[in-house]
Image: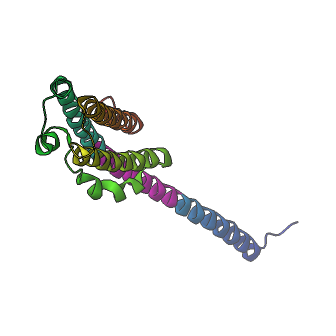
Amino acid sequence: MCEIDWSATAAWVQAIFSVLAIVAAIWIAKQSADQSRRLVADERKRQADIVASRIAMQLGLFAQELETRASHIEILRPKVVSGQIIQRDQLTALLLPSKAEWITDVRHQTLVFDRDSGIRSQTVFDLIDGARQKIEVSILSHGVLESTPEKSAGTLDAIADILTLTAADCREVEAHLEAAHQLNGDAV
């Protein structure tokens, strides 16, 4: 007859349960790490959505300002063509966009974006800065370099192009951020 060696059986049972305990510990650690990664990713997405919402709103408001300023040119152009002189301070008040100081506040926050949103946002920020400088130079040179109504009208047309193209760029990035971060209210 075969006798059971209970001490050997106990050792085998202990070994099997030890292996099962190790496997369970590894599985629990993996589940915990996966949950932590999901929580971090969810928080990062939430932060990116908040920043995207703020930037999209600011871009929309700034585009509206640019479009309004461009519409002033439709009123100014006939006056300039007819020979009426418009003072620099009037041109500045009507055509020069406000300093987009909000860009300084949000420029570094685009680091939470995906690559495409970050590049688009940074590019439009640079375009806004450049557009304001170009318009400012055009206004400052008004009356100094230009002697004819046609040249003044040409300057106004150039400023109108800068305003409308920059507004379109702002609208494009605004739409991209709204779509990429589901900011249009359709998200659940």
The residue under the point 20% across, 36% down is 65
Whether residue 102 can be seen here: yes
In magenta segment, residue 41: yes
Quadrant showing the C terminus: top left
Q: Nearer the viewer, residue 150 or 57?
A: 150
Q: How is the image coloured?
A: rainbow
Q: Closer to the camera, 31 or 152?
A: 152
Q: Position of residue 143 (x, y in %)?
A: 20, 43
Which x, y percent locates residue 139?
23, 44
Magenta span of residues: 31-53
Q: How many marks?
A: 0
Q: Would you place residue 178 above or below residue 133 in this image?
A: above
Relative side of 62 to 125, left or right: left
Residue at 57 percent of width and 65 percent of height: 25
- Is 34 colored magenta in this rendering? yes
Residue 125 is left or right of residue 148, and the answer is right
Residue 26 lies in quadrant: bottom right
Name the residue nearer the viewer: 53 or 133.
133
Q: Is residue 188 visible?
A: no
Predominant SS along the magenta part = helix
